[in-house]
Amino acid sequence: MGQRSSRQNRSRGKQGGRSRRSNKPAIDPRKAWMPDPPPAREYPPCTVSGEPIDDIYSAIADPRTGEPSKLDSVIQKLTEQEQPGENERICYIGEGQFGVVREVSRNGKNVLEIVRRIPYEDRHAKQPWRRELSPGISRDYVPKPEPITELYTPEEERTFPRFGRGGSGYMPR
């Protein structure tokens, strides 16, 4: 009497009666929505060097015109203007800023120390050429999703967890 049958032991498992199977529905790739890729288009030549822009994703906005400029051309221009000292160089440090950086050794590790910040881009200006590069990610992008009634059948919708007044608030893992 003290021992359970093998069927009871198997059904309970090691997790105290919880099933090991997941109740999550499989993701249907036809219903997973991704935005369209950015349109292929010709951009004006670099405002600094006049060369064609080959990688628009690494371009930086010119502070006067807002047009894209090649990152390498801007770094070369700033290097000529700033004349960094020995062991210093110009780097892009983010948010439209460049910096004169120097490599120093601290506690046996080499780290970059920002000597001087150089603001380059207008941080508050929103360039149209940049907005189209990040559909679905940019805060300026407004998606036009299909209504949920067109994505799922009523039978599939009934399997979704309910929260609030009509449901229990419990969502299985």
Image (cartoon, grey):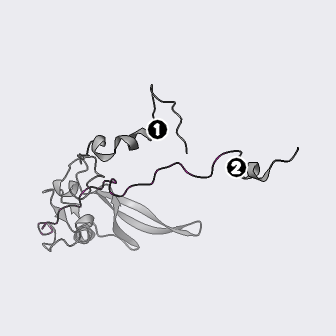
- 60 over 157 or under it: above or below: below
Which span of residues is magenta-colored? 18-46
The one nearer the camera, 46 or 23, is: 23
Toward which corner of the image does residue 81 lie, by quadrant? Answer: bottom left
- 24 over 118 or under it: above or below: above
Could you tell which of marks 1 and 2 lies nearer the N-terminus? 2
The alpha-carbon separation of the residues under discs 1 and 2 comes to 26 Å
The one nearer the camera, 43 or 77, is: 43
Query: At 15% across and 73% down in the image, what residue appears?
Result: 52
Which three-letter amino acid code belongs to the residue tagged 1?
A: Pro
Q: Which of the two discs, 1 and 2, sits closer to the camera?
A: 2
Toward which corner of the image does residue 116 lie, by quadrant? Answer: bottom left
Residue 40 drawn in magenta: yes
At mark 2, the secondary structure is helix
Toward which corner of the image does residue 30 lie, by quadrant? Answer: bottom left
The one nearer the camera, 129 or 63, is: 129
The residue indicated by pointer 2 is 11
Query: At 20% across and 56% down in the image, what residue appears?
Result: 132
- The quarter of the image holding the C terminus is top right
Residue 161's disc number = 1
